[in-house]
């Protein structure tokens, strides 16, 4: 067993539930399999607020106000929804503009929202992500691009600051160089995946869920909501 695997094992043992959460993500079953909610989640997450404390409650509020009432049943509905009404739930205009443009493009691919998201994710070119139809949308950075691909069934990783900090901490612990450039970092995580036997997405989720909030790891603190999201 490599030294790297031993160190990664130590962290993964703290979050054994991660495997199941990631399997659900790769099966496009987050948010009860509602792809509209996945797009809204990604759009809200893109502005960098606390995911569990800010994003999740607002996605749930959106669900209550628009999805459960039947006002928004599809990507087409989201794309054509009144921005003023949407901003009653989430005030950030950029998030809604992004969500509506993503929804409009996915609606053009397939009437089945999940199949549309998965088809885009399969065919998206990471190395040329900036020229991708979704990658070109204002506000969509590489983290949002990767997040959507993960929810569309692709085993990959987001190069966000928490993931980078944790993975680079592990690399330093085993005497390897840290990696900062986004595409090189993603490639590095895939190499770690091959060496350790964990999926790239599992390594990604682990870095988020081993973080502490209020004296508890996130996987403990948010145990009730995690099985849904």
Image (cartoon, rainbow, N blue to C red):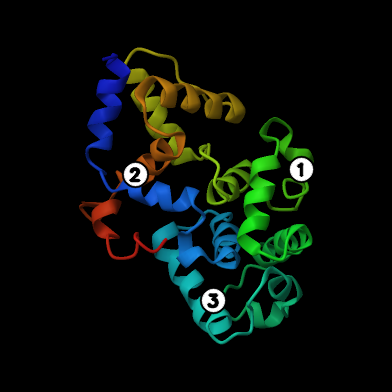
Are the residues tagged 2 and 3 within 8 Å (C-beta)?
no
Q: Which quarter of the rendering shows the C terminus?
A: bottom left
Identify the residue at horizontal 69%, vertical 53% (top origin): 139
Identify the residue at horizontal 70%, vertical 63% (top origin): 103
Q: Helix, strand or loop at disc 3?
A: helix
Q: Which of marks 2 and 3 is nearer the N terminus?
A: 2
Q: Earlier in the sequence, mark 1 or mark 3?
A: 3
Q: Which of marks 2 and 1 is in front?
A: 2
Identify the residue at horizontal 23%, vertical 30% (top origin): 10
* Residue 196 falls in image quadrant: top left
| Residue corresponding to mark 1 | 132
Q: Which quarter of the rendering shows the N terminus?
A: top left
* Residue 40 is at least partly visible in this image: yes
* Residue 55 is at least partly visible in this image: no
- Residue 169: give x, y in percent of width and height: 36, 26
Rendered view: 68 above or below 133: below
Rendered view: 65 above or below 162: below
Q: In this view, does 167 lie to the left or right of 218?
A: right
* Residue 123 falls in image quadrant: top right
Q: Helix, strand or loop at disc 2?
A: helix
- Residue 11: give x, y in percent of width and height: 26, 34
| Residue corresponding to mark 2 | 19
- Residue 151: give x, y in percent of width and height: 54, 51
Rendered view: 179 above or below 98: above
């Amino acid at each position: 067993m490599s030294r790297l695997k031993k160190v990664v094992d130590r962290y993964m043992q703290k979050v054994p539930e991660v495997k199941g959460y990631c399997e659900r993500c790769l099966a496009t079953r987050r948010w009860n399999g509602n792809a509209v909610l996945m797009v809204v989640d990604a759009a809200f997450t893109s502005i960098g607020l606390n995911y569990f404390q800010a994003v999740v409650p607002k996605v749930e509020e959106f669900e209550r106000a628009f999805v459960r009432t039947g006002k928004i049943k599809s990507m087409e509905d989201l794309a054509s929804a009144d921005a003023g009404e949407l901003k009653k739930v989430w005030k950030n205009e950029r998030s809604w503009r992004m969500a509506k443009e993503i929804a409009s493009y996915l609606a053009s691919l397939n009437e089945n929202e999940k199949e549309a998201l998965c088809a885009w994710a399969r065919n998206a070119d990471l190395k040329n992500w900036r020229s991708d139809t979704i990658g070109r949308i204002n506000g969509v950075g590489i983290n949002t691009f990767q997040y959507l691909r993960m929810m569309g069934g692709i085993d990959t990783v987001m190069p966000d600051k928490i993931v980078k900090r944790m993975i680079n901490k592990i690399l330093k612990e085993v005497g390897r160089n840290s990696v900062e450039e986004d595409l090189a970092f993603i490639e590095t995580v895939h190499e770690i995946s091959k060496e350790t036997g964990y999926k790239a997405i599992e390594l990604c989720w682990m870095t988020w869920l081993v973080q502490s909030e209020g004296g508890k790891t996130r996987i403990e603190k948010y145990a009730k909501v995690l099985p849904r999201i």
